[in-house]
Image: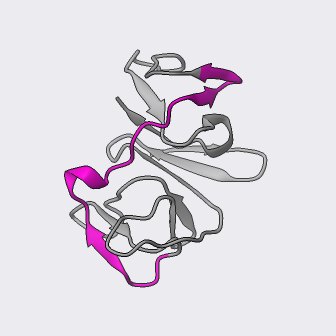
Amino acid sequence: DLQTTGADHSATVNPDQQLIMTKHSATVTPENKCVFPFNYRGYRYYDCTRTDSFYRWCSLTGTYSGSWKYCAATDYAKCAFPFVYRGQTYDRCTTDGSLFRISWCSVTPNYDHHGAWKYC
């Protein structure tokens, strides 16, 4: 895992899971649907996770309270277009900032603020 820190939060990038976890607080909850982002054990998840599990799962509430499900293909985070990265707006996946030139996108409208991304 790669560890980075920002002015008001820390983030862990796990390329194997293609998700970002950042410390924050939470909210929200439609039943039987994954809620993104969700908080679990002090981290904010913007996509399904394998944390504490062999299979990817998600919380059904904004702050994990025991309600969860295994993720189906339709549950994974979607790209958020347009999104802001380094002050520039992107309407599609980009390789900008990618060490290996692999296309990626933000899963929130503002990567600069949330740091949440996935491969395209």
| Residue extending furthest toward the bottom | 66
Q: Please determine whether, in this image, residue 116 is positioned above or below residue 41.
A: above
Q: Quadrant of residue 114?
A: top right
Q: Is residue 12 magenta?
A: no
> For this view, does 66 lie left or right of residue 3?
left
> For this view, does 16 lie left or right of residue 46?
left
Percent coordinates x, y for residue 46 in the rendering: 47, 53
Q: How many marks?
A: 0
* Residue at the image position 59 percent from the left and 41 percent from the top: 115
* Residue at the image position 55 percent from the left and 29 percent from the top: 82
In-front residue for pair 101/36: 36
* Residue at the image position 65 percent from the left and 52 percent from the top: 10
Percent coordinates x, y for residue 49 in the rendering: 35, 58
Q: Please determine whether, in this image, residue 107 is positioned above or below residue 66.
A: above
Q: Please determine whether, in this image, residue 26 is positioned above or below residue 111.
A: below
Q: Which residues are magenta?
A: 64-89
* Residue at the image position 21 percent from the left and 62 percent from the top: 55
In-front residue for pair 1/76: 76
Percent coordinates x, y for residue 39 in the rendering: 53, 68
